[in-house]
Amino acid sequence: MKTKYIWLLAVLLGFTACNSDDDSSSSMDEVLPPLTAGEADFSKYVSVGASFTAGFSDNALFIATQENSFPNLLSMKFGMLGGGSFSQPLMADNIGGLLFNGTQNPDGSFAQRLYFNGVGPTPLPAAPTTEATTVLGGTFNNIGVPGAKSFHLGINGYGFANPYFGRMASNPMASMVEDAVAQNATFFTLSEIGGNDVLSYATSGGTGVDQTGNYNPATYGGNDITDPNVFASSFSATVDALVANGAKGVVTNVPYITSLAHFTTVPHNPIPLDAGTAAAVNGAYAPYNAGIVQAFAYIVATTPMTQEQADAEIAKRTIMFEASETNAVVILDENLTDLTALNPQLVNMRQATANDLFVLPASSFIGTEAIPGNPMTVNGVAIPLADKWVLTPEEQLAIKNATDAYNVTIESVAASKGLALVDFKGILIQASTIGIDSGNFTLTTDLVRGGLISLDGVHLTSRGYSVMANEIMRAIDATYGTNFEASGNFYDCGDYPTNYSKDFR
């Protein structure tokens, strides 16, 4: 019997060896072509952009992710084709965050990076060491500035408003575009311009006030959505300046940011209630529900509103809880018909639906007590969530419309200038639905476990930035005749981490 199994093992080993030999032989027979530059000149590369360009990740900028930023990864490949050195305005540590004259901002802005503590993202228990007021001096190829919106790129003295640019600017009155153009680049990337123009509106729940509790690098210049005409003027002027000397380059379109984990992680129905509690809450809301019916009866009788229209809004606004683990939260919604002139108690509130999106910080606010110790003041149950915590469908549509308008400009400018274009919108749609296959991994936009999006729910992981570098090289291949992909020069995303531990310094 033993002999039988020893023989079977020998046969299996033999098949394994044959397969290995065949694979090895096949691999040896496959000769990849040498890397070629095509029509591109990579001798002087400059990257211009915002947080993604800088390597922002886990709600902070720090050395490790700067070194894994997609421009730095690209520069290494460009170096194989005659590209020169690539300098970055490195932070002082792997903690992230900034000090201002030796002190952290008391409001929590410019804070240290996040790490995963086994339950969720949490701030690293360490103090930043990067001094914002220390000007680095010199010239930097990576002009990636967290927080930069389209119209910020050409503002002289922008470093006074944005400390990330202030510490790298060539002089106090410089603009990002001026510092880029002064380097006389032969190749450039202009990436993610337009993202911050809608991101700060989105992360503020459409209210104009950022509610993250930490530094959100998209808040400079207010949180309103940038007018598409302003964007078009700014983007076109930036590209004109970058190509004036004949430089070639890559631009990227703007994804639908509401697909990011920052807006898709918190469910609309996270409230668990037993039968007794549900009955008590329903009793408290009974006068409100009755008042809604009465108000719309009056409106139907005195205005052109039909009963059918009234019934639809009554159904939308009626608040009802049940014994369940998945009760929807109560929110304020300014898009509802204002009934407070008829009854000041009938504020614009309703229960959320799956069409509402909640900002990530809402996860630590929903279910808390507005008055500690008073269970009748639970936020999201007895007290409706303010608009700053939620993006209603109307606010989501405003973001989409602006994004679509920005992309029309980007695609038109890219075509007119003969630039490579990366479809980040399509890439993010794929990542948020079926996932992106890269090497041995399928990356998604899920928080923590998806691999693509970092712990802040918005920016990429180092692994995600390697994927971004590959996508940019793919676009360069298609436009300028390089062969980064065919020559085997894409990055293996598995070589790059998805997060950094508490002890990583």
Image (cartoon, rainbow, N blue to C red):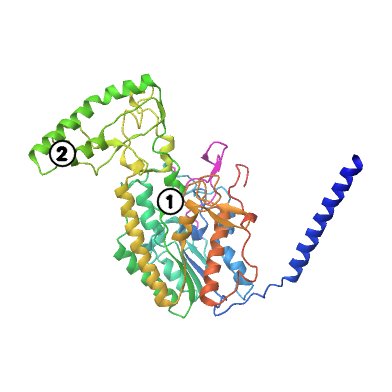
Front residue of 171/63: it is: 63
Magenta residues (range) = 108-135
- Displayed quadrant of residue 79: bottom right
433 relative to 352, above or below = below
Which residue in the structure is indicated by mark 1?
Answer: 259
- 134 falls in the magenta region: yes
Question: Does dot 2 land on a helix, a strand or a loop?
Answer: helix
Image quadrant holding the N terminus, namely: top right
Front residue of 18/485: it is: 18
Q: Position of residue 297 (x, y in %)?
A: 13, 34
| Residue that appears at 36% across and 27% down | 378
Question: Does dot 1 land on a helix, a strand or a loop?
Answer: helix
Q: Earlier in the sequence, mark 1 or mark 2?
A: 1
Of the residues tagged 1 and 2, which is closer to the observer?
A: 2
Q: Position of residue 3 (x, y in %)?
A: 91, 43
Assess whether mark 2 and mark 1 are in contact (beta carbons under 8 angstroms).
no
Amino acid carrying label 1: it is Ser
- Displayed quadrant of residue 127: top right
As drawn, the residue found furthest toward the top would be: 276
Amino acid carrying label 2: it is Gln
Which residue in the structure is indicated by mark 2?
Answer: 307
416 relative to 255, above or below = below
